[in-house]
Amino acid sequence: MTASKAADAPLAMEPGSARLMVTLAVMLSAIMVLLDMTIANVSLPHMMGALGVTSEQVTWVLTSYSMAEAICIPLASYLSLKFGVRRLLLVSVAGFITTSALCGQADTLTEMVTFRIMQGAFGASVIPLSQSIMVQIYPKEERGKAMALFSVGVLLGPILGPTVGGLITENMDWRWIFYVNVPVGFLCLALLYFFVHLDGKGKATVDWPLVFGMAIGIGLLQMVLERGNQDDWFASNTILFATVISAIAWVFFLTRSFRTKGDIAPMWLLKDRNLALSCIVMTGFSMGMFGIVQLQPMMLEQLLNYPVEITGFMMAPRGLTSAIVLLSLSRIIDRLDPRMLIVAGLILNGIGSFLMMRYSLDIDMFWVLMPSIVQGAGMGLVFAPLSQLAYATLAPNQAVGGAVIFNLCRTLGGSFGISIVNTYFSQIQQKEWNALGGGLTPDNPLVQQYAATQGTSVTNPDFIANLTSMLQQQSTLLAFVYTFGFIMVSYFVLIPLLALFKRVKKGEPPAADKA
């Protein structure tokens, strides 16, 4: 990677009070951007009427944002060298504010998708830049504390998105889920302008073939993951074609990055064992976490008939618990073995998923909240130590590049998780519908006996409709239960990978520094 000496040198640590304000500035900015990943989920039905689109078309409001974010995240390392960390962060937040206001003004789907793409593009750099700033302003012996504080925002944002979105939509208007970013964004801009002074500029070159390969590979992969289940995967020629082109583009993109060691999307940093393993674990963990966050509101609203606002409140304890755990651990986390914390976190997430396998149609709020709290505690124990390990063996000048790759894996992991979970859920639901429905025939003595207890006959249209409704409920419930079990297994299979991490002794410089 070509960079100036100024960019290569470790940045000076901020004094205590200034560091606190920088932490507040970057955390608030990260929460604002991450909140918009999920804040629009519960508002889609309201947007359909206002924009005059179908339920299938309105999902592009979500897809366009995630695609733009995933494509632009890898550019942050290059752009920070080209324009400087501070300037890029200010421009990104200012652009995010502007495009958020434009999203609120949109009257057609074309306008909304265009502005959401721009919003995702501007917001993409905020997360890796914020995380890299936290890595650089805290001394190495406080790296765990820095990642614990930053992880509060990473976890609170997407998890509380449905809660905030539900409250705003029910009590104000769906357009305010975008307008709310304006006052919050201006506060972020002020804090960043006055307290963040990191430069990090250096000489950087544009590798256009790599940029095009990256954009095509990541963009088409996001589209495949977002639309695959809805379009019946490879039964759709569009999905099949996009998958093939995406695979070719990814091979080209990765090969060229490792060969040229350029500044854009520095995938070559994955030669670092800790960063590579952290990215694998983060991808797998994000798959489970975002899968759960996707499934639980569906179950509460569609199966248990919870109102949107109550569903949002029921999702909040997961994020709040993770924040409490992270803040409680922040003072002592640097004295603990991060690998053991991650193992404990994965086990807690697995236990929470196991408890969700015990769900029935008669569960009360306690049974909804308890697994969420257990999982929230586990999430807090995974995110911060995993981030700590990811940067443990990287040189300071590689912080932005490492953050870019780490956050790209988090974003793609979430997309993979939602896609896989939705596909698995749909297949299990259909399978259980067929299995349960196969015995519900008029000549089945048990069906006749049940009809008799209801004071009716098996040919009564009302009885048939009631039986069909019960079949739908039970097959859907079983699909949720089996999918929660699938997610539970996905957490446990990650645990053996923790033994492969290299533990850096206290005070030992990163391998890159020694080299």
Image (tube, rainbow, N blue to C red):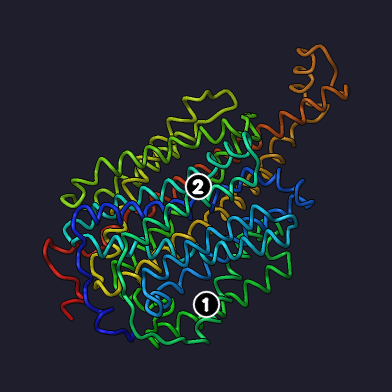
**CA gap, disc 2 and disc 1:** 31 Å
> Where on the picture, by quarter, is residue 111?
bottom right
Quadrant (top left, top right, bottom left, bottom right) of the N terminus? bottom left
Q: Secondary structure at mark 2?
A: helix
> Where on the picture, by quarter, is residue 43?
top right
User: Where is residue 479 shown, x and y percent of the image?
Assistant: 60, 41
Q: Nearer the viewer, residue 212 or 274?
A: 212
Of the residues tagged 2 and 1, which is closer to the observer? 1
- The number of discs equals 2
> Which residue lies at the image location 52% right of the left edge and 54% below the top edge?
417
Q: Nearer the viewer, residue 90 or 340?
A: 90
Tell me the amino acid under the disc marked 2: Phe
User: Where is residue 44 shown, x and y percent of the image?
Assistant: 67, 47
Q: Earlier in the sequence, mark 2 or mark 1?
A: 1
Q: Secondary structure at mark 1?
A: helix
- In the rendered structure, find residue 214 and report the number of the disc placed on it: 1
Left or right? Give the position of 240 relative to 73. right
Quadrant (top left, top right, bottom left, bottom right) of the C terminus? bottom left
- In the rendered structure, find residue 329 and report the number of the disc placed on it: none
Left or right? Give the position of 415 relative to 406. right
Q: Nearer the viewer, residue 280 or 407?
A: 407
User: Where is residue 38 shown, x and y percent of the image?
Assistant: 55, 49
Q: Residue furthest left?
A: 507
- In the rendered structure, find residue 486 and report the number of the disc placed on it: 2
Tell me the amino acid under the disc marked 1: Met
At label 2, counting other C-alpha atoms closer than 10 Å, the crowd grade (few under 14, some 14-19, many 20 or more) is some
Is label 2 in contact with label 1 (beta carbons under 8 Å)? no
In the rendered image of this protein, does residue 332 appear above or below residue 466?
below
Q: Nearer the viewer, residue 390 or 281?
A: 390
At label 1, counting other C-alpha atoms closer than 10 Å, the crowd grade (few under 14, some 14-19, many 20 or more) is many
Left or right? Give the position of 251 relative to 227. left
